[in-house]
C-alpha cells in the first residue's frame, strides 16, 4: 500500500539573493505572474517542488528540495520561474513501465528502482511513453541523471511530445525518495 502526503512551503523572490517582493507558496501554482513580475531566487523551507520556466507547468523543469537557491540563472540556467508544483512525499512501492515508442508501443520494461541508463540496462535507445503506477519519478534526457528533466507522477503518459517535450529523449530515470 502506498501513501502520499503534501507537505511543503517555498518562498519565491523577484530578485536574486532573496531580494524584492516575495510570494509564499505551499501548493501548486500554475501562474506566478499575478504574485510576482519575475522570480530569480527562492528558499524551500520544507517539502520538494518542481519549478518550471513557463506557465501551466510547461517548459524546462528543475527539482528543488529544502535549501536556498539564490540565483536561478547561475545555479540552473533558468532565467525565470513561472509555475511550481508540490511533490507529495511518497511512502510505499515505486513502479513504472517505460515504452520505446509513443502510445505504449515498442519495447516495454517495468522499473521499480532507479535506472542510470536505459541503453545499458535494457538496450533501449529511446523512451517516448510511460505508465507510472506507483510513486513519483524524475526522467532525465541523458544517462546518469544528467541534463534536462521531467517530473512524472502516477498516470499514463502516451506521448511526451504532446507534453511540450518534443525533441527530448529520456535516457535515465530516478525515483523521488527524498524525505523532503
Image (cartoon, rainbow, N blue to C red):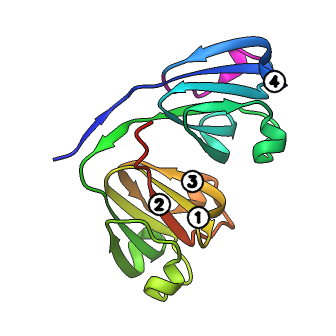
The numbered disc on residue 150 is 3
- Dot placed on the residue nearer the N-terminal end, 3 or 1: 1
Circle 2/circle 4 CB separation < 8 Å: no
Report if residue 179 lies within the magenta region. Answer: no
Q: Residue at x 80, y 34 (%)?
A: 71
The numbered disc on residue 174 is 2
As measured in the structure, the alpha-carbon distance from the residue carrying label 3 to the one carrying label 1 is: 11 Å
* Secondary-structure class at tag 1: loop
Left or right of residue 3: residue 137: right
Residue ID for mark 4: 17
- Dot placed on the residue nearer the N-terminal end, 4 or 1: 4
Q: Pick out the residue farthest to the left.
A: 1
**Range shown magenta:** 27-36
> Can residue 108 be seen?
yes
Q: Residues within 10 Å of mark 3 (few under 14, many from 20)?
A: many
Q: Residues within 10 Å of mark 2 (few under 14, many from 20)?
A: some
Q: Residues within 10 Å of mark 1 (few under 14, many from 20)?
A: many
Most frequent secondary structure within the magenta stretch: loop
As measured in the structure, the alpha-carbon distance from the residue carrying label 3 to the one carrying label 4 is: 26 Å
Residue ID for mark 1: 145
* Secondary-structure class at tag 4: helix
Q: Residue at x 47, y 60 (%)?
A: 174
Residue 113 x %, y %: 36, 65
Circle 1/circle 2 CB separation < 8 Å: yes
Residue 157 x %, y %: 44, 58
Amino acid at each position: 500500500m502506498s501513501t502520499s502526503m503534501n507537505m511543503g512551503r517555498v518562498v519565491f523572490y523577484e530578485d536574486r539573493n532573496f531580494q524584492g517582493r516575495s510570494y509564499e507558496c505551499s501548493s501548486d501554482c500554475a501562474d506566478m505572474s499575478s504574485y510576482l513580475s519575475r522570480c530569480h531566487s527562492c528558499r524551500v523551507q520544507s517539502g520538494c517542488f518542481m519549478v518550471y520556466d513557463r506557465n501551466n507547468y510547461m517548459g524546462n523543469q528543475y527539482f528543488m528540495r529544502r535549501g536556498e537557491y539564490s540565483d536561478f540563472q547561475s545555479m540552473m540556467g533558468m532565467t525565470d520561474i513561472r509555475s511550481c508544483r508540490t511533490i507529495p512525499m511518497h511512502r510505499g512501492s515505486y513502479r513504472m513501465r517505460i515504452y520505446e515508442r509513443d502510445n505504449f508501443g515498442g519495447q516495454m520494461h517495468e522499473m521499480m528502482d532507479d535506472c542510470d541508463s536505459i541503453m545499458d540496462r535494457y538496450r533501449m535507445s529511446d523512451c517516448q511513453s510511460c505508465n507510472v503506477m506507483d510513486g513519483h519519478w524524475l526522467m532525465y534526457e541523458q544517462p546518469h541523471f544528467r541534463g534536462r528533466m521531467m517530473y512524472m507522477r502516477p498516470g499514463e503518459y502516451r506521448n511526451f511530445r504532446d507534453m511540450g517535450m518534443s525533441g527530448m529523449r529520456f535516457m535515465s530515470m530516478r525515483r523521488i525518495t527524498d524525505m523532503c
